[in-house]
Image (spheres, helix red, strand yellow):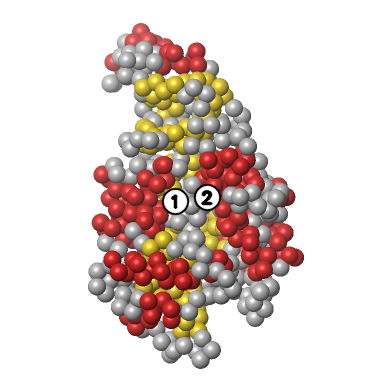
Amino acid sequence: MTLGRTPFLLLAALAAAAAAPSYAEDGADLVLQHGVFYPVQPPGRVEGSLAVRGGRIVYLGPDAGAERFRGPHTRVVDLAGRTVTPGLIDAHSHLRDLGRNLAEVDLTGAPTYDEVVRRVREAAARAPQGAWVFGNGWDQNRWPGKQFPSHEPLSAAVPDHPVWLNRVDGHAALVNARAMEILGIDASTKDPAGGRFLRDASGRPSGVLVDNAMHIADRLPGPSREENERWLRDGARQCLAVGLTTATDMGVDGDLIAAYQALRQTGELPLRAAVFVADNQPLLDEWFRRGPEIDPEARLTIRGVKMYADGALGSRGAALLEPYSDDPGNIGLLLTPGAHMEDVARRAVAAGFQVAIHAIGDRGALVALDAMEKALGGPRPEARFRLEHTQIVRVQDLERMARLGVIASMQPTHATSDMPWAGDRLGEGRLERAYAWRKVLNFGGRLALGSDFPVESPDPRLGIYAAVTRQDLAGNPPGGWLPGERLTREEALRGFTLDAAWSLFLEKEVGSLEVGKRADLVVFARDIMTVPEAEIPRVEVDMTVVDGKVVHERGRTP
Ligand SMILES: [Zn+2]
């Protein structure tokens, strides 16, 4: 329409129509009525209805006000008092690996090394002759003696298949003799920078590879496009079932990015994904040249870079300022030099990317924050730099993060998984700086919550529960571990919604139930904000909605 030839009266009529929209003709696509809504922004609680049209929220308020949005094609859902929150967002996760783990041997919860060997032997018996057997989730801290395993029992039980078993935190792997043969690991193999091959008394590799030593597997062929796409679809399905509408993939290679882009093109990405590019020179050169991928529909966001300052606490690879209390000669591993992190951070900012640095130990965090501060040149919250995990961080560095606007990306279930042995690693004196969510908020910092799935369960109900109780699922320890760090339920919900969205540049699109935002939301069977704390993990997810479309309903497969 050319405005110059439009009669004035028609323009006036159009203006009036815009001022008082009428949905009588076709109505909203979806109306949720008789519900209890926690919009997050503004904080509080709204009883009534929410209407969605064209994938966006067009109304939230009393039931009577929603009547005008009812049309002949409107799906009306009577919530009968059920509870609605914004769609939950996992700010740090590994979506592809979640799907991939379904296809591999699950070693989580194995109470002994014998049990690990048993599960792997069973899987190997079903695998094609000579094929690799992959597994995930072993944790020697659950076994009697808590010692790292040695490959011999595994090699004796599974002599013909090469075996690769990731530790629960992904920062160590156990391989058998056949795998060492294929990978060329023997007594003469040198430890790489930022990694080590654990050895027995005679210097022979024990089969445990820590941190950068795991890169020896880079010489094996990676997954196919078809496998990556299948694992992404499987991972997404698991997320939607627990109320996650946005997931992340921290540190991905070019092949996996191509799989994301293919699914995005064909409309097979049923949730939002934010992808952080791995610290790999040619890949970063390519992305810094072409700039971030900002999807107008916010389905696939590629505008972050992931780096590693150090390893993990469970495998004693986290870099500490003082030695481990239970390993006095060891201060952990710095995986990336500070100068490199600073250089990548500078280039990232110039190219419009954010930076996310994995830092678990206080020395890892110190080096990462020094690099970030130099690259930022001072407080710059709009750059959305993120410190991943923020597990053991000196109190003055937590304060520095708040001042610089560096987001604390934290995973509440890590704290409750690690609490039985974190004190052994750190000693009582260092615990004030451990998993200190409350201190982050008290300094005015921003907390983006997640799970690091598949390291932990993707279920955000477990994250909210851990954040507000700092207890395991049995309610231990009574009163919570370091209970001064507990969050309120409102703070935990904000960390899994609006502030997680902020940490991904998505806060204008999602993260709260506000008119104009995309309609990503979760319907819970009971009020997750008021049920007794012990009930939080069991509040059923009845419905998950992305862009106004119901993508999961309990008891049905849409
Ligand atoms: Zn991770």
Mark carried by residue 450: 2
Which amino acid, by three-letter code, is at mark 2?
Answer: Gly
The residue shown at (59%, 49%) is: 473
Mark 2: which secondary structure? loop
Q: Is residue 177 above or below residue 434?
A: below
- Asked if the residues shown at circle 1 and circle 2 are in contact, with their CB atoms under 8 angstroms apart, the answer is yes
Q: Amino acid at mark 1?
A: Thr
Q: What crowding class fits label 1: few (fewer than 14 Cα within 10 Å), some (14-19), or many (20 or more)?
A: many
Front residue of this view, candidates 178 and 215:
178
Whether residue 60 is visible here, answered yes or no, is no
- In front: mark 1 or mark 2? 2
Q: Is residue 77 visible?
A: yes
Residue closer to the observer: 184 or 422: 422
Q: Which residue is mark 1?
A: 248
Answer with mark 1 or mark 2, whichever residue precedes in sequence: 1
Is 396 in front, or is 435? 435
Is the residue 287 above or below the residue 465 in the image? below
Give the image quarter of residue 141: bottom right
Which residue is painted at 45% across and 68% down in the image? 115
Label 1, label 2: how far apart the Cα atoms are:
9 Å
